Amino acid sequence: MIWTSHAPAPAHGVVLEATGLAHLAHLAHLAHLTDATAVESARATVTAALREAGLHTAANPAAGPTADRAAIDVQALAERVAHPGWDSCWWAQLIADVADELLHESGPHETGPHETGPDEARRDRAAQPGDSRQRAERPADSRQRRPQGAAGAPLAGEHPTGERSPVQRSTSQRSTAEHPVDRSGIVLHAPQDLTGAVHRGRTLSAAARQARALTDLRANQATPDSFARALTDLAGQHGVDVDVRDEDQLRREGFGAVLAVGAGSPHPPRLVSLAWDPPGSAGQQPVCLVGKGVTFDSGGLSLKSPAAMVGMHRDKAGAAVVTAAVCAMAQLALPVPVRAFLPLAENMPGPLATRPGDIITSLSGQRIEIVDTDFEGRVLMADALTLAARHHPRALIDVATLTYQVVTALGPQIAGVLGSDGALVEAVLSAARSCGEPMWPLPLAARYRTQVLSASAHAHVRNHPGQDNARAITAALFLAEFVPPGLPWAHLDISGPAERGSGADAMPTGFGVRTLVQLVEALSTFGGQS
């Protein structure tokens, strides 16, 4: 929420104070952005300018005197870092995004669901059947909890050059007892015409932070059931409708692929559906999103090595990113109806686990030969893609940490994009460029399709290509078997940039949230009436 000088400051967070009017262009600047690297450089420039001016991270509050709030003059800072191709509205959005990131970047994540022990595991398995679909209601006390330990940002005095400092001590009488002091926030001074851009920037920053927090929940904190509850809670705070299918519903409705992935775990799978319907959108085709949600991937009976299991609690990054993005879309009131489908399962080698060689029947009716249980992500997503296609969307986009070979091809900082529709793939890449999230197109090469077709007379496809190369492509080709011909579809393999660092030190990034929000907004003119 944007807090103005006319309302009491929140207990925690960022405060916006309007300082006048400006007649500036709206977000038409996005058409001028051609390179994600340029946007990344712009973020670095803004970060350096904010730190130089006195805004520091939560982990480094000592540089400068302790004060109530940091005040940032958005317009002054935008003028300092101005670029001829990007207008003040674009810079205001970026400054608000970066400032919010700086304020929170070193604080611990919000507390997630509590650890799950054997008793709760039994409760998961013994959950009462029935229709668990619900509209998530906003809690009576819906204030966002701030990550613990984040200190207030210090305040700078005069700029060394003698110019007006973009960051300075807030001495306004509005910061007295009449308006409660926010000792952990900053004040963003912006002309009235920039308040929407500032709100957008802060919303995107918060959504990426929520995606990071959800992704980093550990396996004992986020079973499929408790993770579904966490997603439901977040969606409820933003007025997004939620539908949660439990294992009994999944079995009755024929979600054989989802059930097969979760068969070896004492924590049965879930499938979370999200719906955002803006006012006046009745009769419009939705944009459908799918996010992979493997809450822990041991590899199943095709067991991973101990080293390869490190960090496998983050194999749910796709579901976290999609959920956070949909919530941001609702908060920004994007005029596009959205449906999101999040299959959640834990891949474990329990006594009922799916075995190599098993053949399962998916929601689509296609039978899948399981060659390797560690290639479970594509199997899990098959049913979700089938379900999404039944909503006749104008476009279908999935997000997953699916293959390591996309990292081999593109490195750890670039996501791969494959798809059935050239215009949609280009829309994804354009949105990614505008947000500074680097992505690169890979071919959906039909010449490799035979690698995903099963040689068995009892199955249609297999989950392992039988080759050690082109696996990012063959993974997408497997998914394409569950997307109806003619439906615009794009697959985002974010295995590399979904985290930063390696091993036990790696941390999630929330990569993809900003791209999805920008993309869905752009897709308001893609497709149309149902």
Image (spheres, rainbow, N blue to C red):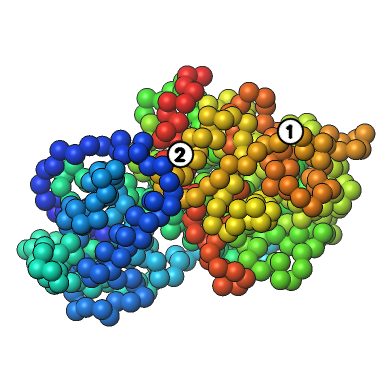
Vertical order, 308 against 80 (above or below): below
SS of the residue under disc 2? helix
Relative placement, left or right, of 338 versus 51 is right
Residue appearing at x 92%, y 38% in the figure? 456
Vertical order, 57 against 472 (above or below): below
Indicate which disc residue 446 carries: 1
Q: Where in the figure is residue 205, as x and y percent of width and height?
A: 38, 54
Vertical order, 429 against 140 (above or below): above
Around disc 1, counting alpha carbons within 10 Å, would you say few (fewer than 14), some (14 to 19), or many (20 or more)? Answer: few
Between 262 and 374, the one nearer to me in the picture: 374
Q: Circle 2 is placed at which residue position?
A: 430
Residue appearing at x 58%, y 59% in the figure? 412
Extreme-left residue of the structure: 173
First in sequence: mark 2 vs mark 1: 2
SS of the residue under disc 1? helix
Amino acid beneath label 1: Ala
Relative placement, left or right, of 122 versus 5 is right
Q: Where in the figure is residue 109, as x and y percent of width and height?
A: 45, 66
Between 176 and 60, the one nearer to me in the picture: 60
Which of the 4 image quarters holds residue 420? top right
User: Distance between the Cα atoms at labels 2 and 1?
Assistant: 25 Å
Q: Is residue 441 visible?
A: yes
Which of the 4 image quarters holds residue 411? bottom right
Between 469 and 466, the one nearer to me in the picture: 469
Extreme-right residue of the structure: 457
Q: Where in the figure is residue 422, as x and y percent of width and height?
A: 57, 30
